[in-house]
Amino acid sequence: MRLPYVLLDHAAEIDIGLIGVPWDGGTTNRAGTRHGPKQIREMSALTRNVHHVTGVRPYELANCADLGDVNANPVDLQDSLAEIEQFYRSVSAKGIVPLSVGGDHLLSLPVMRGICNGRVIGMVQIDAHTDTNAHSFGKHKYTHATVFRRAIEEGLLDPRRIVQIGIRGSLYDADDMDWGRDQGIRIITIEEFHDLGLSEVVRIAREIVRGDPTYLSFDIDALDPAYAPGTGTPEVGGLTTIEAQHLLRGLRGLDLIGADVVEVSPPFDMSGNTAIVAATMIFEILCLLTEQLKGRKR
Amino acid sequence: MRLPYVLLDHAAEIDIGLIGVPWDGGTTNRAGTRHGPKQIREMSALTRNVHHVTGVRPYELANCADLGDVNANPVDLQDSLAEIEQFYRSVSAKGIVPLSVGGDHLLSLPVMRGICNGRVIGMVQIDAHTDTNAHSFGKHKYTHATVFRRAIEEGLLDPRRIVQIGIRGSLYDADDMDWGRDQGIRIITIEEFHDLGLSEVVRIAREIVRGDPTYLSFDIDALDPAYAPGTGTPEVGGLTTIEAQHLLRGLRGLDLIGADVVEVSPPFDMSGNTAIVAATMIFEILCLLTEQLKGRKR
Amino acid sequence: MRLPYVLLDHAAEIDIGLIGVPWDGGTTNRAGTRHGPKQIREMSALTRNVHHVTGVRPYELANCADLGDVNANPVDLQDSLAEIEQFYRSVSAKGIVPLSVGGDHLLSLPVMRGICNGRVIGMVQIDAHTDTNAHSFGKHKYTHATVFRRAIEEGLLDPRRIVQIGIRGSLYDADDMDWGRDQGIRIITIEEFHDLGLSEVVRIAREIVRGDPTYLSFDIDALDPAYAPGTGTPEVGGLTTIEAQHLLRGLRGLDLIGADVVEVSPPFDMSGNTAIVAATMIFEILCLLTEQLKGRKR
Amino acid sequence: MRLPYVLLDHAAEIDIGLIGVPWDGGTTNRAGTRHGPKQIREMSALTRNVHHVTGVRPYELANCADLGDVNANPVDLQDSLAEIEQFYRSVSAKGIVPLSVGGDHLLSLPVMRGICNGRVIGMVQIDAHTDTNAHSFGKHKYTHATVFRRAIEEGLLDPRRIVQIGIRGSLYDADDMDWGRDQGIRIITIEEFHDLGLSEVVRIAREIVRGDPTYLSFDIDALDPAYAPGTGTPEVGGLTTIEAQHLLRGLRGLDLIGADVVEVSPPFDMSGNTAIVAATMIFEILCLLTEQLKGRKR
Amino acid sequence: MRLPYVLLDHAAEIDIGLIGVPWDGGTTNRAGTRHGPKQIREMSALTRNVHHVTGVRPYELANCADLGDVNANPVDLQDSLAEIEQFYRSVSAKGIVPLSVGGDHLLSLPVMRGICNGRVIGMVQIDAHTDTNAHSFGKHKYTHATVFRRAIEEGLLDPRRIVQIGIRGSLYDADDMDWGRDQGIRIITIEEFHDLGLSEVVRIAREIVRGDPTYLSFDIDALDPAYAPGTGTPEVGGLTTIEAQHLLRGLRGLDLIGADVVEVSPPFDMSGNTAIVAATMIFEILCLLTEQLKGRKR
Amino acid sequence: MRLPYVLLDHAAEIDIGLIGVPWDGGTTNRAGTRHGPKQIREMSALTRNVHHVTGVRPYELANCADLGDVNANPVDLQDSLAEIEQFYRSVSAKGIVPLSVGGDHLLSLPVMRGICNGRVIGMVQIDAHTDTNAHSFGKHKYTHATVFRRAIEEGLLDPRRIVQIGIRGSLYDADDMDWGRDQGIRIITIEEFHDLGLSEVVRIAREIVRGDPTYLSFDIDALDPAYAPGTGTPEVGGLTTIEAQHLLRGLRGLDLIGADVVEVSPPFDMSGNTAIVAATMIFEILCLLTEQLKGRKR
């Protein structure tokens, strides 16, 4: 993005901070998302200043800055969770709304730990997978497939204020989605997405999260692999980029306290198009965040 | 797929056999589908156990096995046709329903020779091309572009019980499709597919093949090259993967005596996504075959 | 295309000439379209003789020839503009309708200079960008982003007879499109395209250009990068190839005096599919040109 | 190469003809060499007019032409062998020395059948493999791994006048090379190549083929895969391009009646460098052929 | 390799076991070696039965089997170290000499823990890096850059019986190699390798490890990136494959109690050639192991 | 490199400045070097702090900084030449020794115009091509193939103090090198390089440029395409990276007033290895520059 680079320690008066989390320590299959932030930053040179539909000018509306990359490492998972959480505690303490660029989906957990400050928040999750498994490989509690089960258990997320959109793909067990549904999560599979239509999906999502503090999590594998091949667990039959853009634009005015775009894996993104798609979605979300901030400031 | 590997000679009590046909001896342009079975097997690790829409559990409903690869070779076409036919005669003799992974489309001919046992069968063919040319290069009778003309001439297929869906692309001659239509084949071009809508196409297809023995042939080039670039004769303007999935799910309950997924060409599939798409379609078809088998067993 | 190669100096009785313009001297970001004509010619071997929907047989209806490549060079922009203009003056003098293959979009300017002969023409532009910037980098007047501003200023194009379809992407300034709209250009953004529907877009386009001399300019980046990744300035959320094909078929019967397909960049087209898409669009346009020519000849 | 394209039927006064054989019908593992001639022609644009060491100007010394591609097909091996042989009979009848571009190595057999005219010739073969297997897959007589056994059996090649340079790689059986050695072939493995040194290898090669009619066959897999990755059966530990160039320059003055460069497989040549290497070797050989021709004419 | 697949639990009378360790939990920069074993197995189809220089027939000399992949996971480093160690304890208990395929270099640590059984062994390490750092990122003790420091500290390796060949590349600190040299490790940089010559390097290596139990560790990045680009930390200016082959052949007759080939990373190995190179080195090592075993059995 | 980023306007006390010139306006064939500086900066993360042979610590010996990219554009050649010259005049005025990263080779001309300040300098040029053509395409004076002819004509370079190493490849005309040799340039072709041996080449180079002000220009195509495929005009049969490293180390102690590494073209560098090679060479040169500066300061 066309953002000034600011060290967190020197960040003052920043409204929205773009933060890279070059870490794939929670990835159970094809690694590589640790290189996501770098490639997305590079490709973001193709985005410009004004949203062509909403007319939002994010860099004028708010004080945006690139806060650089969090210090995480691939060889010690708990250490990285702690490092990320600590970084986001500081971000939160400075009143900065974080827009994170992954890295794998497990990063949402330490981010939420860092910014919730005792609040139990809602979430709009655009994703192919629910990421609410009990564990991975039968024993590991912290992976990108268990992240939101952990966040619910830790009291960070209110499951009745979670909507998951774009879910699909064959299941390990017939009851894979039962736990989430039992908790109260509203799961909108890709089939239901097409049955309901985009407007109705937007209406449902807004109804679920309402005006309370909400996190927006965008897993790039929500998109069909034709649009976003560069990811670790591609799932056939997903959203088009246009559908995703309209979905995001439908979230204007929500109380978003943070957002992330995750699971872009450059080693599997030979044309670089997945990073371009991710940069476009980040721009859409940045416009959401700044517009809402402006509304709040008034 | 998550299947045990069983040698055909030792196969007992197998209901459905996944069979690789690593052979592109009938390919007239860009070769490479001989590597298809290997890559699709590899990518099939991304599929799981339960169909997320129909709830079918193929590995519980039926005794499924991977019967390995047929012994074919690229340097002697007639010899390979004979080898493949012989293999499928044995498969058929053991009462196994074959789900074949190509390889180029010519393989459907020896497969049908091996499993028809005197029956004249119907076919649902999802494809960009009719593959009913009289010959290729003006003289060659056995290629992937002539396969179903040969199968009709040999009395294996009943043309009035064939429906071809997704046909498109410029023609060699204005009468390219006349022979097929004269025989009674129902050709649904991609334009007609969009005009009729998916439900009506499904209705027509079911009406044509009815409850009699039917073969399902899925040429990966039926899909748009954006979704499945790794094929030898890509044809712009095709099906999306979601359309193909809904089409397949519309075939539940037919009397399918065999199926194939053909023309995946790894050397032209740089991201590996075509193989993932193929594995997903194979899983969809496997669920069709097992569900129907269970129905029949009752 | 399956065309005889004819040197322009020896071209007699040619109705439609395919012309390569291997030049990216107007490209401001990622170069590479200079290799477009070669790759598209190669991939055009996959097109055949008859349009499968309209039944048009271009090679029978008109005398088509491949006139080879224009002599342009990447190290002297004004020299190249002059070379291209001169070539098209000769093409025009021989009564040949040019179908150009780029190269970057700046080539449309010298082509129009060469073929307008004092006429002020209309244009159907299928594109992600309006290409009517005042300048690039604050000072350069001749680039692929300013081409149609220059053509309007030079009196080659009548802005009230221009329709731009598929426009999208974030803007440099909120007033990026104001100049064009003030001139009378009808801009149909991708969002408006989806709101109006394809038939209505076709109706509007025809209403704007009417039966007067019209140029057809197809920038491959009008298509979504999933369908056409090999281009210098990909813009997420574009047309599908099917939409583009239907759009082109909607232009039958217009008075097209020339056309181009531009911005295919082989170094960014790893699978070669963008070139296949371009060849398909060229075939669609060739059918338009020959059908209309035949109508006129009667 | 910078050669005029001449149809064989119209070829008069041609000394040396470059001929493409886009055919991989004899390939037992990874296909793709059918696309070799096209890619090598394209990359040959990077070669120029004068040899920088020998000073030979091939296009001035001899009348060189590109005779286009032989008509071969991948679906009928014996038919293709006959087509190729017939083409080369015509080439030979017109007194043209053929420089062939493959295609797989089996093409050397019909070429020799076409040009030997009863002569029993010698051969310098630069290759990783001897290609003198009795058969492939236990039964197939005509493949790229058996080609020179067949040529010897047919009395086309005199085994005592064959030298094979660069042979390496693990063997199927310990006696794989025994047949060849028993016939009198001088096999210089890569290990022996390094022990003897380049000058001594050149001396031996010249001693073996002497001044009698000799064929030069260059399999691109003679080179190490680091230099020429785009081939079907890469063999680690091969020649560098500099070694190959010096080897070829060591063959000046021999009585070469034909030559080929084979086994370039574009689908496995992602960077295109293998085709550039092949074009360079073809230029080296073209200089050999023209220089010798000039010597003979005197 | 052409090996029967045997489950470790059922392994009886096996002399040499090929074992995959699909794990990159110790990788600090570009991940991906977890996919190494799969790709190397696939490419190993290009190796055959007999060593063409030594004449060794590994599959006849010894009872070789593919023992499959160790169960490791990317989300818990200590758990994986324990799993790998346990597996190799069983391998060792059955008297099987393990030939491991990585995976990243950290795997050598649990392998040595599993097979040393109280012995302090020597090592021939062919590598670009010494892998004897004190820690990575200032605090992490277990990574692929610290592995042999840990092994020495744990008393598994005798530093005076370690020779490291091919070391190169800029250093973090001037004293990076001091610790190792102080321990007694003989470091042969690539510069010294070229100064001494291959024979002298072999002589030194044999002198250092002598006839006592020795481990052979081959990091693919010892090779120049031109020969083996598919690795996480490529280092310019390395060994050629021929040099590596001769180096390995120079180790005949040593008392090798295990060996590994590590750091092949398929996501960075676009042509697949690095895996072919690795498979070739594995074949060379397999011949070493079987030949020595045969010697010992006598 | 691990360098602080400093804006030129704020640069004080900087000894050596790394400068990107993202410009390929002088490229006559395959463009793409405009992306070179970005990719090389990215890959330079793999270099470290201390030279492992000379022990030089560049970041301690001198005050090094990354001065960012020069402002150049691809659509106006003369404008870019002026921009680059102006930038280097400022660099020179501040007493900074520039180490430039291209971009195409034409950039050496404006760099020399900016830093020569009336001096006539010598040059060590490591390159496959002499780049002393009179013009390109018969009329264009300023391209990457004419750059040093222009620099000599402008009195920037003393031809008798120029040595060109690694020259090779077929010629346009037999007298291509005559002009340079007539001027007094010492051309060492790759063949002569191998005949003389590396030490003698180093001795000759030092003898020619002596202790007077000298520029070092490293064209990445001096290296063999196996080592550096990512370039616009690859030339088979070049230097290995080890040879290039030893060549550079042979230049210690010369009076180098500037250096560049040019012609890295990321679109043709699929594995990224060419950029890694370039970063390694830049590190070697940085060590040369800092060591000499330290010597001078004393």
Image (spheres, coloured by chain):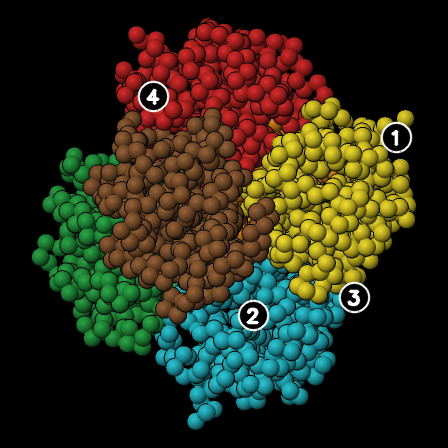
Chain colours: A red, B yellow, C brown, D cyan, E orange, F green
> In this image, A182 relative to E124: left or right?
right
- Measure the C-alpha gap from mark 4 to mark 2: 59 Å
C207, F283: nearer the viewer = C207
Q: Are marks 4 and 1 on the same chain?
A: no
Q: Are marks 3 and 2 in contact (CB under 8 Å)?
A: no
x and y percentages locating residue E134 in the rendered image = 44, 34
Q: Which residue is mark 1?
A: B296
B147, B39: nearer the viewer = B147
Q: At 73% from the left edge and 53% from the top edge, which residue is drawn? A: B179
Q: Are marks 1 and 2 on the same chain?
A: no
Q: Which residue is mark 2?
A: D69
Identify residue type, mark 2: Asp
Identify residue type, mark 4: Val
Q: Which residue is mark 3?
A: D139
> In this image, C192 relative to B173: left or right?
left
Q: At 29% from the left edge and 65% from the top edge, which residue is drawn? A: F137
- Measure the C-alpha gap from mark 3 to mark 1: 43 Å
**Element carrying mark 1:** helix
Task: Read off the chain for label 4.
Answer: A
**Element carrying mark 4:** loop
The tag on residue A56 is 4
Q: Nearer the viewer, mark 3 or mark 2?
A: 2
